Amino acid sequence: MELKEIQNLIRFVAKSGASEVKLEMEDVKITIRTGSGKAETTIIQQQPQQVSVPSPVPVESAAPTPAASEKAEETPKDDETSNYIEIKSPIIGTLYRKPSPDKPVFVKVGDTISAGDTVCIIEAMKLFNEVESEVSGTIVKVLVEDSSPVEFDQPLFLIDPS
């Protein structure tokens, strides 16, 4: 990629209003971040790397590994919550349990909700997105605290549909 093309790309990103653009090609990686009226560009050129693969070593152990015993301990927890339905985060952002700081929370443990009820708000890039329940039931557990960051598909609430 030539310097002229990179400059044109920077101008295009700045005009588009995007806050960050990443472009990866065979030998070039470009990240353009905009904000406060200026564009910041990072260009990293990488050479192909050779990776050596170690030969497999036979394992002769009859004792269970710590990971296997941890999985066995987690199984009963999964059985207890298997009849509950999770409400998951549809986006990445900051979760708010209240419509505003001086209002009560949307839902709390023990509340009965219907499909379509708002259970929280997630702020992403200055936009507030209401998260609605897709099922009816009773809130059994709140898994995320107010004003905390959440990831895509992260469980937020446990619902007992019965």
Image (cartoon, grey):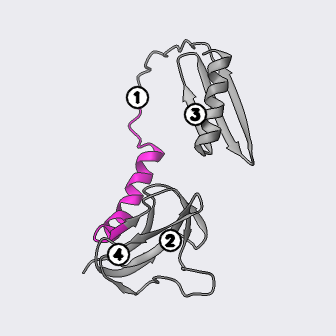
Q: Which element type, helix, strand or loop, lies under badge 3?
A: strand
Between tags 1 and 3, which lies in front?
Answer: 3
Residue sitting at x 51%, y 56%: 92
Q: Earlier in the sequence, mark 1 or mark 3?
A: 3
Instruction: Indicate whether 50 appears above or below 76.
Output: above
Query: Gap between marks 2 and 1, in whole Å?
Result: 52 Å
**Of residues 17 and 145, which is closer to you in this image?**
17
**Of residues 14 and 46, which is closer to you in this image?**
14
In the rendered image, which quarter is residue 41 located in?
A: top right
Per the image, the residue denoted by label 3 is: 22
Query: Badge 3 local density, few (<14 within 10 Å), some, or many (20+)?
Result: few
Instruction: Indicate whether 89 appears above or below 34.
Output: below
Magenta-colored span = 61-86
Per the image, the residue denoted by label 2 is: 121
Confirm whether the magenta stretch covers residue 67: yes
Query: Gap between marks 1 and 3, in whole Å?
Result: 46 Å
The type of residue carrying mark 1 is Glu
Per the image, the residue denoted by label 1 is: 60
Residue 73 position, x and y percent, is 41, 59
Between tags 2 and 4, which lies in front?
Answer: 2
Query: Badge 1 local density, few (<14 within 10 Å), some, or many (20+)?
Result: few
Residue 18 position, x and y percent, is 59, 44
Q: Residue 45, can we see it?
A: no
